[in-house]
Every structure is written in C-alpha cells, then in structure tokens.
Image (cartoon, rainbow, N blue to C red):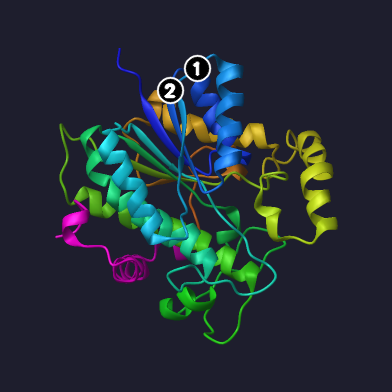
Amino acid sequence: MTQQSVLITGGNSGIGYECALELARQGWQVIIASRNKEASATAVKKIAQETSNNSIVAMELDLGSFSSIRRFVKEIEEKNLPLDALVCNAAVQMNKTLVLSPDGYELTFAVNHLGHFLLTNLLIKRLLANSSRIVIVASGVHDPKMNTAMPKPFFSDIEALAKTGGSDKNKYNGQLAYVNSKLCNLLFMYELVRQIEKTGLVNNSPLVTVNGYDPGLVPGSGLARDYPPALRFIWEWILPGVAYVLSPMFPTINPVWKSGKALARLVTDPKLKQISGKYFPSHSKWQEAPSSEASYDVELARELWQKSIDMTKLKTKESSLLH
C-alpha cells in the first residue's frame, strides 16, 4: 500500500505539530513547512522518535513571501512529492505595530490569507492528481455571534484590508486584522470549493475536498509570539493547564493536543472522504456546523479571489483553477 503524504504549514509547533504527530502515528508521510528551520528540525526529530515513523521531513517556507512560496513549490515539484492532503494551518497575530510583508501587504493578511491562497493554487494540480483533501484552519473569532474577547470582523475595502488589515487605510488594529484574516480563510475556502467544482467531478465525487476548521481557544498554540512578555508567559505556561481542565465542560476551550487530533481527523476520517465545503468548529465538538453569515457572501468571496490573484501575481499557467 502506497504511503499517504500530507503537507502541514506551521507543523513545527502548536496545533500543527499535534496534527503532524497524530498523522505520523497513523503512518503518513508528513511534510512540515515552516520558516523556522531549527524548530522544524526539532519537531521532525521528536515526531520520528515518538512514532518510529521516519517519513517526517521539514521544508523551509515563509508564507509571508511570494518568492519563498514559489521556491518551495518548485522544490516540491523537483522532488516530485505526492500530496494526499494539504493542511493550511500556519497563522500570525500581530499586536504591536503595523508590519508589512516583503511584498508590501499587512503581514497578518499576507501570511494567513494570501500565502495560503498562493500555495494552494500552485499545488492544486498535484492535489487534484491524488483526489486530495484540503483543510483550512480558520477560527471562531470570524463569527460576530460568537462570544470572544476579540473585535468583530469587518472590512468593506479589500485594498484597505491588504494595507492595514481593516477598512481604514490609515488605521491599524492588530486584533481586527487577525479576525478579518480568519473571515478571509472561510471566504477563500468556500470559493475554492466553487472553483474546484468548475473543473468537474469523477464518478460524482469531488476531485478534491476542501473544508474549514476552528480549533477553538487553544492556549500555548504559538499565536502569542507578539504578546508582551507577561501575557506570553500566561498564555504559554498557565492557561494550557486551565484549558485541559475546562475543555470537557467548554468545547470552545481546548488543550493543543486535543485540537491537533481533531484537525488530523479531517484529513483521515473515511466518513469525510466526499464531504466538501463544510465547517467544523470547536463549539459543535468538531461536527459540521454553519459558519458566520458573512462567510457565505459569494460576491465578496469572488472579489477576494480575484484581488488575491492580482496581489500574488498568479498566472494562468501556474494554477489549474485559472482560465
């Protein structure tokens, strides 16, 4: 039996690491894609030791850089690595000041949305060849009906969104940029499903399934990199224990291992083989549930798709989904 292969962005820490660990236990070849080479090498070594699976590799990828993404995909192609699944997991949350990507876009939007948009399109031919699964990690903060400590997502101008993460080209709010990027994840997910459907079906089955996932509030997940030292200490060392205790009673609060294992299920569960265009949030204990009303806005999703093509300078020859 041919070994199945999965690419996980941000698979060297947090939820991505736990997902990689679970899939390695099940015998998958795991490709960990991250810009932190040292952390990735450590993750590969730990996973291999714990699972006795030696098919764990690390590859360098900076999702905030279009040139890095293109180099990464070229390396995938040169090595002719098959892909049975792509987990778009990596994310950043900037809180202090506006940071621009090497290509001139607000970094949260660049990494969380544009990077995964470009990566997926560049890999789509390879994914289509294997009837693969794509899982896009979003967040419950994208839904204004959810009770979170974050601002409600809102943007009306994608050009402004790309510049500051919000609707004002002259005003930056790191938390708003993050929640908006998570809404973009789901707008992208639903539009990606529609674009794939245009390529046709095989035996009435999707060529590639695409689903969204919300891990819930996961202390220790790595999103606190930009927090002040005291808050980062609490997030990384105090709250994970609290999450472990509260998780059985509050499904929106989870330890890292629990969310990572649930993410791996979306890759492996045979019941989900033909399920596409669905959202699996923590508040429903990772059963299919509706996402926010805004996430179903077809016109906004199409605009975001086209603007993303323009921003990433994606060419027709680079993606099977462009015509």
Q: Is residue 308 magenta?
A: yes
**Which is nearer the N-term, disc 1 or disc 2?**
2
Q: Which residues are magenta?
A: 294-323
> What residue is drawn where x is 61% and y is 40%?
13
Q: Is residue 91 magenta?
A: no
Q: Position of residue 196 (x, y in %)?
A: 24, 49
Q: Are marks 1 and 2 in contact (CB under 8 Å)?
A: yes
Q: Quadrant of the N terminus?
A: top left
What secondary structure predominates along the stretch shown in magenta?
helix
Is 32 positioned to the left or the right of 176 in the image?
left
Q: What kind of residue is marked 2?
A: Trp
Q: Position of residue 60 (x, y in %)?
A: 46, 44
Is 250 positioned to the left or the right of 184 in the image?
right
Q: Mark 2: few, some, or many residues within 10 Å (few <14, many ≥20)?
A: many
Q: Position of residue 268 (x, y in %)?
A: 43, 26
Q: Position of residue 176 (x, y in %)?
A: 61, 70
Q: What kind of residue is marked 1?
A: Asn
Secondary structure at badge 1 equals loop
Residue under circle 1? Answer: 53
Residue under circle 2? Answer: 28
